[in-house]
Amino acid sequence: MLENGAAPPPGDSYSPPPAGGGLGTRLMRRKPVERLVAEGGQGEGGTLRRSMGVWQLTMISIGATLGTGIFVVLGQAVPDAGPAVVLSFVIAGITALFSALSYAELAGTIPVSGSSYSYAYATLGELIAWVCGWCLILEYGVSVAAVAVGWGQYLNEFLNGTLGVTIPAALSAPPGQGGYFNLPALLVVLLAMVFLLGGAKESARANTIMVIVKIITLLLFCGVAIQGVKSGNYANFMPMGMAGVSAAGATLFFSYIGFDAASTAGEEARNPQRDLPRAIMLSLVIVTALYCLVAAIAVGALPWEEFKGSEAALAGILKTVTGHNYWSVLLAFGAVVAIASVVLTVLYGQTRILFAMSRDRLVPTVFSKVHPKSGVPRVNTVIVSLFCGVLAAAVPLGELADATSIGTLFAFALVNVAVIVLRRTRPDMPRAFRTPFSPVFPAIGFLLCLYMMGSLGPVTWVVFGVWMVVGLVIYFGYGMRRSRLATAEK
């Protein structure tokens, strides 16, 4: 029997691995789709609450995506690609699109909080699921820190333009970048934690307001900055060649990691089979269109050589174009809200990934303990927030962004494989959304993810390799023996 008292469906019932089974058998054990769905929402001491519709889910995906690449990472990508950074956004967006199609199919078929971790558990086996979940921890947890680092830059722009003061570099930059401790980065993570502890519905409402503010802010930037666009700024369109465009695209893929955030809300959506695929695809279309529009205007209004890796590039462009601080201050305010929204929604996704892994006993059960009144995994939220906040305060942005990109790309690659596998093993399973031209599109998505990973630098690969080794040590030393499938707990 399952935890909710229902028997596993015929033909896909769970049976523990045979006693004395080989290591390969244990590593490849899979969790049936029906069991994953039946356990949805159940945690230690309470259950998650289904309170979100397609609007809130779309806003979660946009909130987790829109802002980071255009407000923070754009200034670092332009020196690599020049004006062709627009193509870099397109390449990253197309790469994300193929994976988004796979996510949309699996989110509608397996509507649970674990996102690609759960999809891998149902199709590729426990070891691959662990690797995927470990990548998601890198993707979500570290990206919270990376985004929070950039938040302080725009906060200083806003404070300087309104009050004439800034937070001293010693307290607004991490070690190695002229500071000792990035206090604003820690504060924005703690602020997001407070919202999350209030409940999923309340967090979604706050996020929706912030998303509307940042869309208006970006459209305002376009309306003002377009007045300074000069055709000569596009003349040397691809100064670093296609290699530069690809390198920038790999870095900017960091800007698209949020579209899958809706899939982490599978156990808090009212109609997940219908609404999750819609939210994922709609959010990706909106975000890609805005990214390309803003990037095209930004490199047209300011020569690409002058970006110099600024983490507050858009505010500087408005100041240059208008000659006044008013517009740049307004944009800085919008960026402060926008990046706070990214922190909120990505932090939400991280807590739900750990919730699913904890429910399967691959990580300690404290992460799946749900408060009975608020329906929130409180201890999980506090632990994750404190970890991400300290990381944001102590590590520079560049290293974080690339490390997040490689973890994301690896997880996306596995999702594309999972679609192909589930189509072959469970072809008759009801699917609210079907990836077109399968297995061709999922295969293309898989290859594009590998290509983008290959464009990242050797240091990023070393960091990723170390991260994977640490993850495997934890799995073999803790998760493999304690997982619910290993202990045949039903």
Image: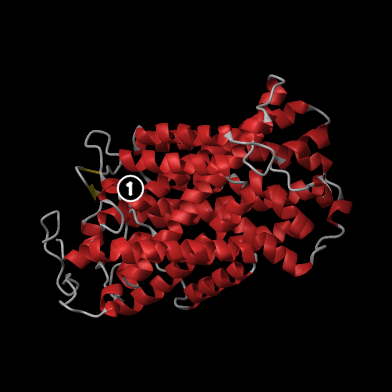
Left or right of residue 465: residue 288: right
- Mark 1 falls on what kind of element? loop
* Residue annotated with mark 1: 269
Q: What residue appears at the point 57 percent right and 32 percent down from the top-left corner?
A: 184
- Residue 435 visible in the displayed image: no
* Residue 196 x %, y %: 39, 36
Q: Quadrant of the N terminus?
A: bottom left
* Residue 119 x %, y %: 35, 65
483 relative to 417, above or below = above
Left or right of residue 335: residue 486: left
404 relative to 310, above or below = below
Q: Quadrant of the C terminus?
A: bottom left
Identified by mark 1, the residue type is Ala
Q: Nearer the viewer, residue 420 or 165?
A: 165
On the image, which quarter does residue 94 sit in? bottom right
In the orientation shown, which residue stands out farthest toward the top? Answer: 163
- Residue 232 visible in the displayed image: yes
- Disc 1: CA contacts within 10 A as few (<14), some (14-19) or many (>=20): many
Q: Nearer the viewer, residue 417 or 440?
A: 417
109 relative to 190, above or below = below
93 relative to 391, above or below = below
